[in-house]
Image (cartoon, rainbow, N blue to C red):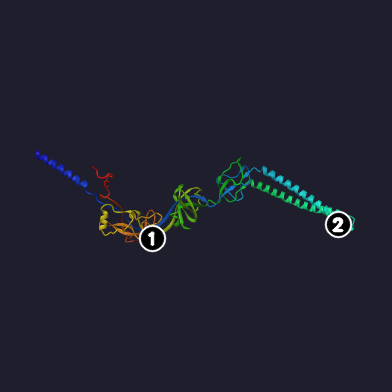
Amino acid sequence: MKKLAIVFSLLILAGAAAAFLFHKRTPEITYKTAKVERGTIVATVAATGNLSAVTTVLVGTQVSGTIQKLFVDYNSRVKKGQAIAEIDPSLFNATVEQAQGNVLNAEANLQKAKVTLADAERTSARNRKLLADGIISQGDYDIAETAFQSAKAAVRAAEGSVAQTRGSLMQAKTNLRYSVIRSPVDGVVISRAVDVGQTVAASFQTPTLFTIAQDLTKMQIEVSVDEADISRIMMGQKATFTVDSYPEQTFRGNVVQIRSAPVITQNVVTYVVVVNVDNSELKLKPGMTANVSVEVARKDDVLKIPPAAMRFKPRGGDKDKAAASGEKRPSGAPQGGGQRDGGKPGGRKGGGQQVYILKEGKPVAVPVKTGIANSSAYELAEGAVKEGDEVITEQSGGDSGKKKPSASPMGRPF
């Protein structure tokens, strides 16, 4: 019985020891790798903006009055010169009639002044002969001459009155013509701000009644680009963008304008870049928000390194293994060796970037130099890495992932 108890105790101790050794054993370290491939890398600058028509005309009114008729509505196609609204013309018609009466009165006064002038001219000529014959005195002749000159002045005054009244008549007719509001361009009505019966007042600032987009088949995007990226934007660069209405479709455009005026919002400086867009299918509408990517650099048939490989660093004891395998880490090398999505290499120029490859199951650092980049790949500009080589992107296993207990801020416990 005692022997059986001893054997049972030994079995329990052996099992406990085996379990302890199993849990104490360091898990095997494994590495995830990716191939270095050849392909195309496109560096872009991302920004957002709003779609608008290339030419948008704000149609107002030059006279005041009450809207009597509306001939168009939202999305109506209009031609240049087409009537789109009418203001009640009653007062303008009355003003035209009054101006015409004033013109007739002024013309009658002019005819009367001309008759008076002709009579004064005849009297002056007759008195001139009588004065030469000594029949009348010099005083009588002077009176007749004065009347003649006064009649000439009265004719000029009457002519001025006629011109003035004709100008008033022209102004009244112009105001009457302005009571019919016409489209200044061919296009589409995208906004209407008035209704029938509404009174509009033309004062120092002309009210906007309609907004007409001249041609919706050609649109533009005003993109806000950060000051850090504006130096890489050039005229003629290609751009792609998406809108929320068609998330599965990519639209294309070109940079046509880079405005120098800064836009400062909460101490953030941006610049407006205008991208022209073809909208032949009329899918895009004014005001849509566009997520734009401007192509600032492109290289074909280059070696591509995954971004995870540029960020990878061995953890724990693997650093010592990498060093033992002949690696000499450059001074000040960045942890990520990364690069901005827009194509600006991370780290310092001339060194500091590296990737890791497996040799005999151990990570070995290989210095590299990258070129342009985007969110999916880096260009391998220099380095002893070839197409098809496997670069390490991730490490798993080992005791390096375990966190060491942090020291108490109060020092060693009692």
Q: What residue is disc 2 on?
A: 128
Kind of residue at disc 1: Asp
Residue 298 x %, y %: 41, 58
Work out whether 307 lies above or below 23.
Answer: below
Q: Earlier in the sequence, mark 1 or mark 2?
A: 2
* Disc 2 residue type (three-letter): Arg
Label 1 secondary element: strand
Q: How far apart are marks 1 and 2 (CA)?
A: 110 Å
Q: Residue 284: give x, y in percent of width and height.
A: 49, 49
Indicate left or right for 323 with 264 as reference: left
Above or below, 300 against 407 in this view is below
Q: Is residue 348 left or right of residue 106?
A: left
Q: Which residue is more in the foreground, 111 or 12?
A: 111
Quarter of the rendering occupied by the N terminus: top left
Quadrant of the drawing holding the C terminus:
top left
Mark 2 residue element = helix
Task: Sort mark 1 into few (<14), some (14-19) or many (20+) by Cα contacts within 10 Å.
Answer: few
Question: What residue is pinned by disc 1?
Answer: 301
